[in-house]
Image: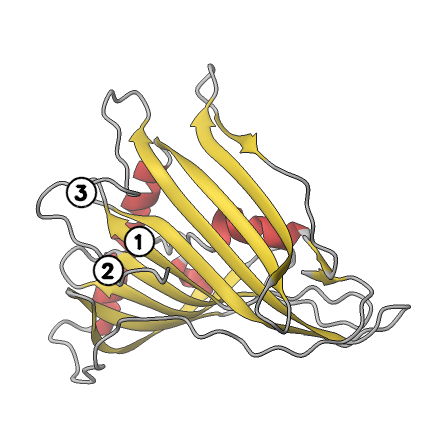
């Protein structure tokens, strides 16, 4: 987010519901390094499968005033599909006028919506991160390993997760991601800041865990300068992913308002 000129306001951030159980700090029977290797391999498999799915993404970015009312919004509905040549494309379905006045959407904001929030940690990418085993924790009824992840080196024009992931003990796939996408640009007159977020996945095809909901919320502190006044801006991001359908398949997989097939697991219920 890049700040626009505005008088200073101060807001209180809203807490995100988690639904997590107590953390079990007992060392796992399997070495954490082996668990990391296995779940990274599973994430690679999931990423390859996801590349063959179409889905709908609804992205909403809001600024919130001191009365907790929305005073500006970016809203866009995109279908991630395949064109006649088989190439993956994003088709804008609905995009009303952008009413954000206190901040502007930056290229990194769009990059986070497209790739950062639905975070996937593959075997190809895991070498870029320090991954530390934290413990074992329930996410609703799903037994998970918790890991803290942080980038080893930040390369220019790349985005990284700094936060925590929860990995299904049985399926060895990420079910919840919580943290921030980094880096932020904190240079005065060039500030580009981003709120913390949480993404939930659901096992909606009987095998893979797909992102279904992201919520980001926080106060971004802009120091001002170059004609811009210092200000604190309350930001709320909500992204929904639905209508997953394997390319070439005649069956349709939904998550909103649809009953999932028997035996499928769901992580923490996203806040309403």
Q: Do callouts 2 and 1 mark residues in contact (Cβ within 8 Å)?
A: yes
* Spatial CA span between label 2 and label 1: 7 Å
- What residue does disc 3 label? 260
Secondary structure under the numbered disc 2 in the rendered image? loop
**Mark 1 vs 3: CB contact within 8 A:** no
Earlier residue among tags 2 and 1? 1
Q: Nearer the viewer, mark 1 or mark 3?
A: 3
In the picture, measured across the screen, residue 107 lies left or right of residue 121, that is right
Which is more foreground, mark 3 or mark 2? Answer: 3
- Picture quarter containing residue 28? bottom left
Position of 33 with respect to 191 (left or right) is left
Q: Mark 1 highlights which residue?
A: 201
Residue behind mark 2: 267
Task: Identify the residue at the far right of this view.
Answer: 227
The residue at the point 16 percent across, 53 percent down is 265
Residue 150's place in the image compared with 1, above or below, is below
């Amino acid at each position: 987010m890049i700040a626009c000129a505005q008088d200073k306001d101060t807001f209180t951030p809203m807490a995100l519901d988690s639904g997590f159980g107590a953390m079990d700090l007992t060392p796992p029977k399997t070495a954490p390094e082996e668990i990391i290797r296995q779940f990274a391999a599973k994430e690679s498999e999931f990423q390859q499968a996801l590349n063959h799915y179409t889905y709908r993404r609804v992205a909403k970015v809001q600024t919130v005033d001191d009365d907790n009312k929305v005073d500006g919004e970016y809203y866009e509905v995109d279908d991630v599909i395949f064109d006649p040549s088989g190439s993956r494309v994003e088709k804008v379905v609905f995009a009303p006028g952008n009413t954000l006045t206190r901040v502007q959407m930056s290229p990194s904001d769009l990059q986070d919506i497209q790739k950062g929030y639905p975070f996937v940690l593959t075997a190809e990418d895991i070498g870029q991160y320090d991954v530390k085993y934290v413990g074992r924790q329930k996410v609703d009824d799903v037994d998970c390993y918790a890991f803290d992840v942080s980038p080893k080196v930040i390369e220019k024009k790349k985005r990284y997760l700094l936060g925590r992931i929860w990995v299904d003990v049985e399926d060895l796939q990420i079910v919840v991601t919580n943290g921030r996408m980094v880096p932020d640009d904190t240079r005065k007159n060039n500030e580009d800041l981003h709120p913390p977020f949480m993404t939930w996945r659901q096992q909606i095809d009987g095998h893979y865990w797909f992102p279904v909901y992201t919520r980001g919320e926080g106060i971004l502190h802009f120091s001002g300068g170059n004609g811009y006044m210092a200000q604190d801006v309350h930001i709320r991001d909500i992204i929904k992913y639905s209508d997953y359908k394997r390319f070439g398949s005649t069956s349709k997989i939904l998550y909103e308002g649809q009953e999932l097939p028997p035996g499928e697991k769901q992580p923490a219920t996203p806040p309403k």
